[in-house]
Amino acid sequence: MLTKIYKNVGRNAKTLILTEPLWSIPMSWIFFYRPMFMSIVIGLLSVEIGVLITVFNLLTSVMPLLGGYLADRFGRKRVFMLFDSVCWLTSLIIWAVSRNIWHILLAYIIEGCASTIYSIWECLLVEDTKLEFRSFIYGSVSAIWTIGSLTTPIAGYIIGLYGLNMGCRLLFLLAFCALVPAYIIRQIYLREPEIVRKVKRDSPFSGVKGYLNSLSIVKRSRIILTLLIIIVMAGFFNSSYAYFSLYLIHNEGLGLSENVASLIPSVSSIVSLMLSLIVVPRLKSSGDYLKTLVSGYSLGSLAIFLLINSPRGSLYTALLSGALLGFYSTAAFSVSRTFLANQIDAIDSRARAKILSVTITLSSLINLPTPTIVGYLFSLNPKIPFIVILATFLTSLLTLICSFKSKKYPE
C-alpha cells in the first residue's frame, strides 16, 4: 500500500522526504540538548534564554510573510534554497564556536531568517501531489522527525562521552556536515511548481492584496479558522519546548540525569512513528481528521498532567508522559497540517502560500513574548509553565469539540 501511495507522490515531495533525515535527525538532537548547552555551558539564566527565543520568534513573525511574497515574485525553489542553506549553515557554525550570549543572539537572528522558507517548504511539499496522498507526505515527514528523536540516546552517548560542552559543539558540526549534501540534492532535483506561474497571472492572489483575499477565505471557512486557532495555540508549546528538556533535569522538576533524559523523546518518537506510518495515511474525511485531533489533544493534556504531578526521579511516569505526547505531536503537526492544506485547496489552491504564511506569522506574533514569560515562570517554579501549557491544550480541545458539534462536516 505504501509503495502504491509513494508512486503517486510528486517529484518535489519525494526529494524533500528523501533528504529530510539529513535535517531532522541531527536537528532533533540539537533542539533537545541546546537549552542545556545555553544554561549549563554558556551560563545563561532561564529568563535570558527566554529573551533569546523571543528574538527568534520576532523574526519568525515577520519573515514568513516576506517569504510568501518573494516566492510568488521570484519562484519557490530559488527563495527556498537561498534562505534555507545560507541561514542554517551559517547559524550552525556560529553555534559550534559560541562562547557568550552575543554569539548565541547572532545565531538565533540568522536562524530566525530561515523562517522565510517555512510556508514555501510546505508549498513545495504538497503542490504537485493530489489531496488524497498528502496525509502520507506529512506522515512521512513526521515519521522521519520522530526517528531523529528516537535516536536521541545516540546524542546522549556523545554527550556522556565528551561532556556537554564539547559534545554539543560536535552535534552542531555533525548537523552542518549532514545539511551540505541535503542542499546539493535539493538544488539538483527540486522543480518550480506550475502553481507559481498561475499566481503570477492571477492578480487576486499576487502581491500584498493576495494576503487580504486569502484572509477573506479564512473568514469564510469555519474549519480553516478552527485549524488556525489550534495551530496558534500549539505555538505556545513549541515556543516553550526549550524548557521541556530543562524540566527533565532540573532538581525541582524530574531531576533526571542528562543521559537518561534522552529516553523521554525516544519513547514519544516510537508512538509518533507508529501513528505517522499506520494511522495518518488512512485519514480521508473531515470527520476522520477532527476525531484524530480531538484524541491527540486529549492524550496530550493527560501527558502534561502526568508530567506536572510526577514525583522527582520518577522515570516510568516520565516515559508514560512521553508516550502520550507522541499522540499529541502527531496530531499537532501531521494531522492539522494535512487537514489545513486540503481545506485551502478545496476553496482555492492559489491562496495556499499566503494562508500558510499568515498562519506561521500569526502564531509567531501571538507567541512572541511566550519564551520570556515562560522563562520567568520557570525561574519561579519549573512546574508553572507546564500548567499553562495544559491550559492551552484544554482550550484547543474545547475549540475542536465545539467546532465538531456546531456543524456536520462533509465526508
Image (cartoon, rainbow, N blue to C red):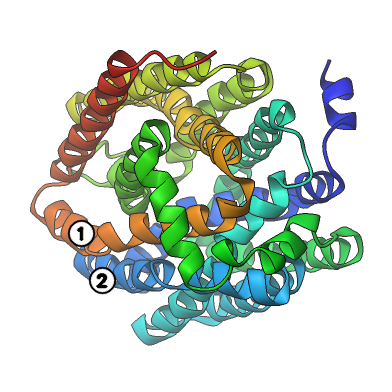
Residue drawn at (42%, 38%) of the image: 224
SS label for mark 2:
helix
Q: From what the image shows, is residue 233 above or below residue 355?
A: above
Q: Position of residue 35 (x, y in %)?
A: 38, 59
Q: Which mark is residue 51?
A: 2
Q: Which mark is residue 29?
A: none
SS label for mark 1:
helix
State the image quarter where residue 225 is shown. top left
Residue situated in front as seen by the camera: 333 or 33: 333
Residue 312 visible: no
Q: Is residue 216 left or right of residue 390?
A: right
Residue situated in front as seen by the camera: 13 or 270: 13
Mark 2 residue type: Val
Q: CA distance from mark 2 to mark 1?
A: 8 Å
Q: Is residue 350 left or right of residue 65?
A: right
Q: Position of residue 180 (x, y in %)?
A: 79, 69
Q: Quadrant of the C terminus?
A: top right
State the image quarter where residue 133 is shown. top right
Q: Quadrant of the N terminus?
A: top right
Q: Which mark is residue 375?
A: 1
Mark 1 residue type: Gly
Whether the residues at callouts 2 and 1 have beta carbons within 8 Å, the answer is yes
Q: From what the image shows, is residue 364 above or below residue 320?
A: below
Q: From what the image shows, is residue 163 above or below residue 238?
A: below
Q: Is residue 255 left or right of residue 149?
A: left
Of the numbered discs 2 and 1, the one sitting upstream in the chain is 2
Residue 20 visible: yes
